[in-house]
Image (cartoon, rainbow, N blue to C red):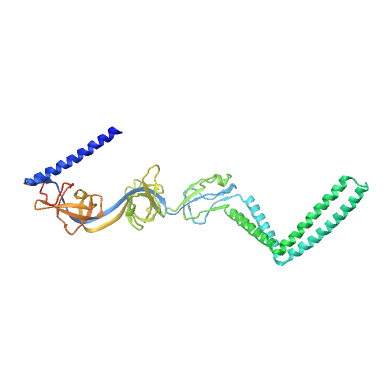
């Protein structure tokens, strides 16, 4: 590690020394009247565009994967791959015997709970509980009398210990039933029993809704208009074991899904237009428009660089374009007519964070600060009141370039 640091220090020192020598040489040459030889570039006035070029995959803009979590077996399949379907059209049906029984049972349970609550509201429940309590009281008094008689007989040796124990158990059971009936009356009068019945009704209502939903789900329908691009549904096999059962794509509404680097996503906006090309359709240039930009960035695979998912609608997609095709996308993120543009080789970014170009005037350099506008592939818009079309600039400027430095364009006569 120490040797590496030493070597790195030597390289940096050498670069700095060379730059210093070059700067010293240029200054000395200029002081002695010699001119620095430079290549020239030109300021143009033309149309410029900036682009973001990405690759993606053609997907349906309206697609659905149809599955079922039911344990019931598939009874019938109504569609095949490649078949066009409408929203709500039946794709398959499951066996419903068990589901039907479950649904009927849930309806009966709800009806019972509703009746019990209705009785509580109308007061008939209290009347019935009081009558039941009277019956339980009579049973208790009878069991008590029977026990007392049996105990007297046991004391006189007329009955066995087992007969006494049995009489005592009957008494305890009768008393417990009577106490429960009295407690039920108290709860009914206080309203707590009604609340429990209301909760029971709600519980049974939810159970019925679930049973109805499962019964309805036994018929699988397409949630979108489109084409069945995948069918893996077989009769006789449990529905939940077949995933996906169907995949439906709307092939009349196609998109390109692509990822834009975090360093370029700031250039992309909803509504921007794009040109879409691909190896599968080499003779076509399709028009596209950005319709969606993901709200967050994600890392792709094992890469650390983050990217953002962007979706582009394909305008009037021709026949033959299929989902799954790869596609190249050229998004026009900015454009301007009659812009002053310069090659990137004319720019110098200085330590103050500003960009400069060096205009050649009368054999000398004139340092001109500029602002960057639209950035194209090879040229960039240069915004400055000190520049005009046709101006000649020095190429590949570095920190040795100074305002007023004498220069000579390569290839031109001295």
Relative height, residue 58 to residue 2 (above, below): below
Judge left or right: residue 239 versus residue 176. Answer: left
Q: Nearer the viewer, residue 155 or 46?
A: 155
Locate residue 168, reporting x and y percent.
84, 50
Question: Which residue shows up at 35% across the image and 58% down it?
Answer: 271
Q: Quadrant of residue 26?
A: top left
Question: In the image, is 187 to the left or to the right of 205?
Answer: right
Q: Nearer the viewer, residue 67 or 97?
A: 67
Q: Position of residue 153 (x, y in %)?
A: 92, 49
Between 216 and 399, the one nearer to me in the picture:
399
Looking at the image, residue 305 sits to the left or right of residue 29; the answer is right
Residue found at the very far bottom of the displayed protein: 122
Where residue 321 appears, x then y in whole percent?
38, 50
Q: Position of residue 191 (x, y in %)?
A: 69, 63
Quarter holding the N terminus?
top left
Q: Quadrant of residue 111?
A: bottom right
């Amino acid at each position: 590690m120490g040797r590496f640091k030493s070597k790195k220090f030597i390289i940096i020192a050498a670069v700095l020394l060379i730059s210093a020598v070059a700067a010293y040489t240029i200054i000395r040459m200029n002081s002695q009247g010699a001119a620095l030889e430079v290549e020239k570039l030109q300021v143009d006035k033309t149309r410029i565009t900036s682009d973001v070029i990405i690759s993606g995959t053609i997907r349906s803009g309206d697609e659905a994967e149809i599955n079922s979590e039911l344990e019931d077996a598939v009874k019938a399949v109504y569609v095949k791959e490649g078949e066009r379907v409408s929203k709500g059209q039946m794709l398959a049906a499951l066996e419903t015997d068990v589901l039907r029984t479950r649904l009927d049972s849930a309806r009966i349970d709800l009806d019972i709970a509703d009746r019990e609550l209705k009785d509580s509201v109308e007061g008939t429940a209290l009347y019935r509980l009081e009558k039941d309590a009277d019956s339980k009281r009579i049973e208790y008094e009878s069991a008590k009398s029977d026990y007392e008689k049996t105990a007297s007989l046991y004391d006189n040796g007329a009955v066995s210990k087992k007969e006494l124990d049995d009489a005592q158990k009957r008494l305890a059971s009768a008393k417990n039933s009577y106490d429960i009936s009295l407690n039920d009356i108290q709860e009914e009068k206080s309203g707590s029993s009604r609340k429990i019945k209301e909760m029971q009704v709600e519980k049974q209502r939810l159970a019925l809704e679930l049973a109805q939903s499962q019964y309805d789900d036994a018929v699988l329908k397409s949630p979108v208009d489109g084409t069945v691009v995948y069918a893996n549904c077989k009769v006789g096999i449990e529905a939940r074991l077949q995933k996906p059962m169907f995949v439906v794509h709307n092939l009349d509404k196609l998109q390109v899904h692509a990822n834009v680097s975090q360093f370029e996503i700031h250039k992309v906006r909803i509504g921007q237009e794009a040109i879409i090309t691909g190896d599968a359709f080499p003779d076509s240039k399709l028009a596209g428009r950005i319709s969606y930009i993901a709200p967050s960035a994600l890392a792709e695979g094992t890469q650390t660089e983050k990217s953002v998912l962007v979706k582009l609608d394909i305008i009037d997609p021709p026949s033959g374009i299929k989902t799954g095709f790869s596609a190249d996308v050229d998004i026009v993120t900015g454009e301007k007519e009659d812009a002053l543009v310069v090659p990137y080789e004319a720019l110098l970014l200085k330590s103050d964070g500003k960009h400069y170009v060096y205009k050649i005037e009368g054999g000398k350099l004139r340092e001109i600060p500029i602002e960057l506008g639209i950035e194209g592939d090879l040229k960039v818009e240069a915004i400055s009141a000190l520049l005009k079309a046709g101006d000649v600039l020095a190429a590949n400027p570095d920190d040795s370039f100074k305002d007023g430095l004498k220069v000579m364009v390569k290839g031109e006569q001295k």
